[in-house]
Amino acid sequence: MTHFDYDLFVIGAGSGGVRSARLAAQAGWKVAVAEEHKPGGTCVIRGCVPKKYMVYASQFGKAFKGAKGYGWSADNVRFDWATFRDAMLNEVERLSGIYTRNLGGAGVELINARATMKDAHTLILHPEGREVTAKHILIAVGGYPFKPEDLEGVEHAITSNEVFHLETLPKSLVIAGGGYIACEFAHVFAGLGVDVSLVYRGDKVLRGFDEDVRDHIHAALERSGVKLITNTVFAKLEKDSDSVINAHLTNGDVLRADQVVLAIGRVPYTAGLGLEAAGVALDGAGAVKVDAYSKTNIDNIYAVGDVTNRVNLTPVAIREGVCFVETLVHGRPTAYDHSDIASAVFTQPPVGSVGLSESDAVAQHGEVEVYKTDFRPMKNVLSGEQSRMMMKLVVKADDQRVIGVHIVGDDAPEIIQAVGIAVKAGLTKAQFDATCAVHPTVAEELVTLKDKYVPNKG
Ligand code: NDP
């Protein structure tokens, strides 16, 4: 029988890789995980975690303003970027340390190296060049921000990777993109007092979300002072002698800013990994092709998380990892069900969404009923804050199942986590209605929506 150095070798210590490695080691497998940077991956090191801290930092500005309506005086408040940034990065460091300790505690060997594949069972650890073998390999290397190399002056732009490390808070910022990252950062920086322009190639941000969500966030961006420039993209970027960047747009406009951020999607991190040497098949976007059990076309090689470009969210990578261990280590084939995944966009106000948008529901199921409400939340009345709350239920007409819930407003991410259980469980509108309201809350609207929305009268 062939001897391998490891039962399982995981490439990448992000959300999916770490969970898989720990569970496999706890089941008695000899496991190693290679990480070229710090354990934690995109989520902990340069994504969800520091982003959420930036959202919190940004929200204080509005809170100080709103506090006046409640009798507080909060004059002469000021924000110090360096103080906040260092605190945020210290916390990221602390969390990465916890990831490292948890791996060790589970008996996983953490190898601080870039691992590439020599063949389906052999890995090369760089820069040392040492080779190790593994019976099974899990690819969990995630993705990285897309930077179009054919854009003249692209070197002057930064991405979400660098945003958390800025030396100083820019006075002005141009962001390209209209997805999660672009919209979240536009609100974050506008809230910190930065002059923000958002350049988007379409006509309304957050494509793929329910139309009502898109309308609300588009309007919210404008209300928070973000200059939205739509139906255009960067033609080139140039840096002045005074370090100001000129962003030339294809519509002829030129925007001047201290920083330019590209948030135009992410790319699976498969290049240079030696996947062709191992015979692993990729799709047209460079993502590792996998079956429902996260297995690649090579029997002993699996992949989870963003590198497979299925649903690119941390909790999904973790669930895929759990299913991978169930399948391979415990011999219980388990496919992760990617339907009805609740998610949030941390704009201000934030979005919480689960299930189908109204248009996708109509396309898939034909007749649907829509219940929706749009109101000024109680808290905003005294604070003077103008943002509104939107809640929407999409109900399948024939069996009355609630197949989509879309919320924009404070606490929407918290609310959607709970209501996601009901949608995943396939509950009906009548079961929502049979649930007693919690008063006074904004979420009570979810169980008190009575009138079907009729477009012309709505
Ligand atoms: P998204 O895929 O969400 O958005 C990319 C945006 O860039 C879209 O608006 C897209 O336009 C635009 N775009 C794409 N290519 C180009 C191009 N060549 N030129 C100009 N514009 C372009 O990517 P993000 O980078 O915002 O985020 C990546 C992923 O990370 C998300 O999809 C999500 O899975 C995850 N994420 C999740 C978060 C959360 O859960 N809160 C937060 C941040 C990221 P168009 O709409 O026309 O395609």
Image (cartoon, rainbow, N blue to C red):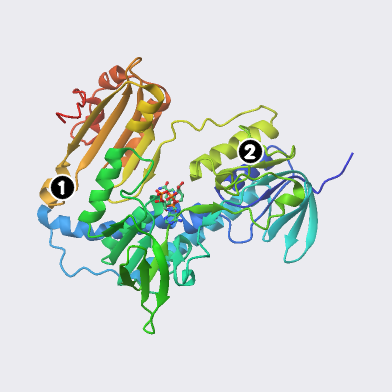
Q: Which is more toward the observer, 307 or 254?
A: 254
Do the CB atoms of the residues marked 2 and 1 lie less than 8 Å apart? no
- According to the picture, the residue beneath numbered tag 1 turns out to be 380
First in sequence: mark 2 vs mark 1? 2
10 Å crowding of disc 1: few (<14), some (14-19), many (20+): some
Position in image of residue 26 (x %, y %)? 67, 40
Check the image and report above or below for 441 versus 332.
below
Is residue 261 in view from this perspective? Answer: yes
Front residue of this view, candidates 302 and 207: 207
User: Which numbered marker is on residue 357?
Assistant: none
Residue placed farthest to the top in the image? Answer: 398
* Residue at image point 75% right, 46% down: 279
Q: Residue furthest bottom?
A: 241
Residue beneath label 2, please?
A: 290
Residue 456's place in the image compared with 102, above or below, is above
Callout 2: 10 Å neighbours few (<14), some, many (20+)? Answer: many
Q: Is residue 265 left or right of residue 10?
A: left
Instruction: Tell whether circle 1 marks a residue whose Cβ is less than 8 angstroms from ligand 1.
Output: no
Which picture quadrant has residue 74? bottom left
Along the line of sight, the residue nearer the viewer: 451 or 241:
241
Q: Which quadrant holds the N terminus?
A: top right
- Helix, strand or loop at mark 2: loop
Residue 235 vs residue 289: left or right? left
Q: Residue at x 32, y 20 (%)?
A: 367
Which residue type carries mark 2? Answer: Val
